[in-house]
Amino acid sequence: YQVIEFKKCKVDPVYFIETYVKIPHPVSSSVYPEIRSYQKNMIDIYNHNRYVVGLAARQMGTTMTRLSYLLWKIIFNPDKSVLLASNTMRSAEDLLNRFMFSYDSLPNFMKIGISSKNKNTVTFGNGSRIIAISINSKSLRGVTLTDVYCDNFSYTDQAKAIDFYHSIIP
């Protein structure tokens, strides 16, 4: 059964998210998300396009949709290097904490193991890693990234945003 489920999840990120990913909830502590059609569309866009820029209203579940997709990507695709960036370090760490909450809530047969973990970086057993930084950081120059997720980018000073963009784009 677990091998069949693992194979289903590997080919279908929506199935993986709807079936196995729990997200933090302010009242119930955690819930399995109900994926809406626009969120399924977002996942499809992420999965089939290399560069995606999105503008979304607040409180629509877009952050957890993206974090859940990145969780799927890291688990089922080795050697990924994912960046979570936000306007403040506190926000970036919160993104990483929410990501790790979902990872920790997975059943054991879905987990790939953690090689190392600190406040801002988690490296997984399949060679993938996830890094959380503030948009103001310049510490990533020269780091090869496969995925970059910028949250609250609109709250960043334009000059800092441009400098950050140039520091992560080859």
Image (cartoon, rainbow, N blue to C red):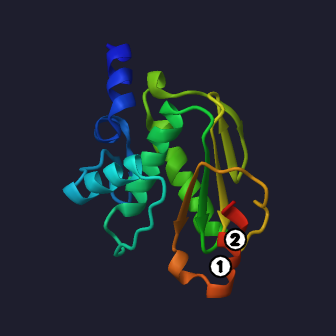
Residue positioned 40% across, 52% down in the render: 46
Which secondary structure lies at badge 2? helix
- Picture quadrant of residue 92: bottom right
Residue type (three-letter) at the residue carrying disc 1: Ile
In percent of width and height, residue 147 lies at 56, 52
User: Toward the viewer: 58 or 47?
Assistant: 47
Q: Which mark is residue 133?
A: none
The quadrant the C terminus occupies is bottom right
Residue 115, percent from left and from top:
70, 31
Q: Residue at x 50, y 46 (%)?
A: 101
**Considering depth in this image, is 74 or 163 the residue closer to the camera?**
163
Q: Is residue 22 left or right of residue 104?
A: left
Above/below status of 75 relative to 150: above
Q: Residue at x 69, y 48 (%)?
A: 121
Mark 1 touching mark 2, by CB under 8 A?
Answer: yes
Q: Which residue is mark 1?
A: 162
Which image quadrant for residue 164? bottom right
Q: Neighbour class for label 2 at 10 Å: few (<14), some, many (≥20)?
A: few
* Residue that label 2 marks: 166
